[in-house]
Amino acid sequence: MSKAPSVTLLAGPTASGKSALALKIARETGAVIVNADSQQLYADLRILTARPSPEDEAMADHRLYGVVDAAEAWSVGKWSRAVLELLAELRAQGRPAVLVGGTGLYFMALTRGLADIPPVPQAVRNATEADYLIQGESAFRRRLAEIDPLAARVIERGDRQRLVRAMSVHAATGRPLSGWKAGTRPLLAPGAWTGRVIEPERETLYADCDRRVDRMMDQGVLIEVQALMRRRLDSTLPAMKAVGLRELAAHLSGDRDRDAAVAALKKVTRNYAKRQLTWFRNQTPEWPRS
C-alpha cells in the first residue's frame, strides 16, 4: 500500500505571496497545486483574479484553475466535491497536494465540515434581502439574534451577505443556520493535513496590493474585463462579483476616468485583503503563520 500523501492547506489574503510559495513547495516536493480561491476558478478573468501565469503553470502541475465558464455558478459544495475527488486520485498515485487560496469557506469546509443545507428559494432570499434594506443592519442583526444567537454573534459587522443568508435559511427551513452546521464533520480527516497562513505586515500587504493593480493594468486587464462585460451575463453570478470588476466596468462604460478607476481598484483590493486577514485571524488562530 502506498504511503498517504501529505495535504498542505496554504491560506492567506490576496497579494500575500501564497502562489509563489506554493510553486516553491511544489517544485521541491513534486506536489500538485490545487486552487482554493473561488474567483480563480473562472476562466474569463485570469488577470483580474491574479491566477498563476502560464509560465508558472508550466513549472508545476496546477489543478482547478480557470476550469469554469463565467456563466456557471460554483458553490463551496461543488468545489469541495471536485477537490475530494482530485485528492482521492492523487492519493492513489502517492502524490502530495498543496491547496492554496484566499477563500476561507473552502478551507473551513475541508477542516470543519460542510452542512447539507436545503436550497433557499429565491423568493425567500429576495424577501429577506428586502427586510435587511428596510431595517438596516443593527435591527436585522437583533432579529437574527432571537432565532440564531450564534450566527448573529460570529458574523462580522458589515457582512450583509452572511446575515441575509442566516436569516433566509431559518425562514426557508425553520431551523437556524448554526443548527444545520452543528452536525457537520470535516471532509479531511484530522491529522491528514497541515495548515499554514501567510500573514504579511499590513502596510507591506497593502503596498503589494497596489503594485499588483499596477501590473494588472499593464497586463491588459481592461481588455479582459471588456470581453466579459460584452457577454451581458447575470450580475448575480459569482464571476460577476470578482473584486474590482465593477470599478473597471465603470471606467469602460465612461462613468469613471482611468486614474479614478485605478484608485478605486486599489482601494477595493486593499479592503478585500483586510477582510481576509481578519477572517483568517478569527477562524484559524491555531494555524502556523509566516
Image (cartoon, rainbow, N blue to C red):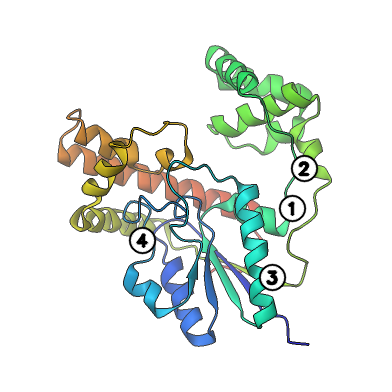
Lower position in the chain sequence, tag 2 or tag 4: 2
Q: Are marks 3 and 2 in contact (CB under 8 Å)?
A: no
Compute the Cα span from label 1 to label 3: 17 Å
Judge from the rendering whether residue 288 lies leftward or rightward of residue 56; answer left or right. Answer: right
Considering the numbered disc 2 on the image, is that residue within a helix, a strand or a loop?
A: helix
Q: Quadrant of residue 141?
A: top right
Label 4 or label 3, whichever comes before in sequence order: 3
The residue under label 1 is which amino acid type? Answer: Gly
Residue type (three-letter) at the residue carrying disc 4: Thr
Q: Residues within 10 Å of mark 3 (few under 14, many from 20)?
A: few
Q: Which residue is mark 4?
A: 204
Instruction: Determine which residue is flagged by label 2.
Output: 181
Residue under numbered circle 1: 113
Q: Which residue appears at 29% of the width and 57% of the height?
A: 212
Graded by Cα atoms within 10 Å as few (under 14), some (14 to 19) or many (20 or more), the crowding at tag 1 reads many
Q: Amino acid at mark 3?
A: Ala
Describe residue 231's horizontal placement relative to residue 95 as left or right.
Answer: left
Mark whose residue sits in front, 2 or 4? 2
| Distance between the alpha carbons at the discs numbered 1 and 2 | 8 Å
Is the residue 206 above or below the residue 61 in the image? above
Element type at marker 4?
helix
Position in image of residue 133 (x %, y %): 52, 16
Q: Earlier in the sequence, mark 1 or mark 2?
A: 1
Calculate the distance from the C-alpha at mark 2 to the C-alpha at mark 4.
36 Å
For the residue labelled by badge 1, is the local secondary structure a helix, a strand or a loop?
Answer: loop
> Circle 3 sits on which residue?
88
Residue found 61% across the figure and 48% down from its top: 76
Q: Which numbered tag is attached to residue 163? A: none
Residue 214 position, x and y percent, is: 22, 55
Q: CA distance from mark 4 to mark 1?
A: 33 Å
Foreground mark, 4 or 3, reads 3
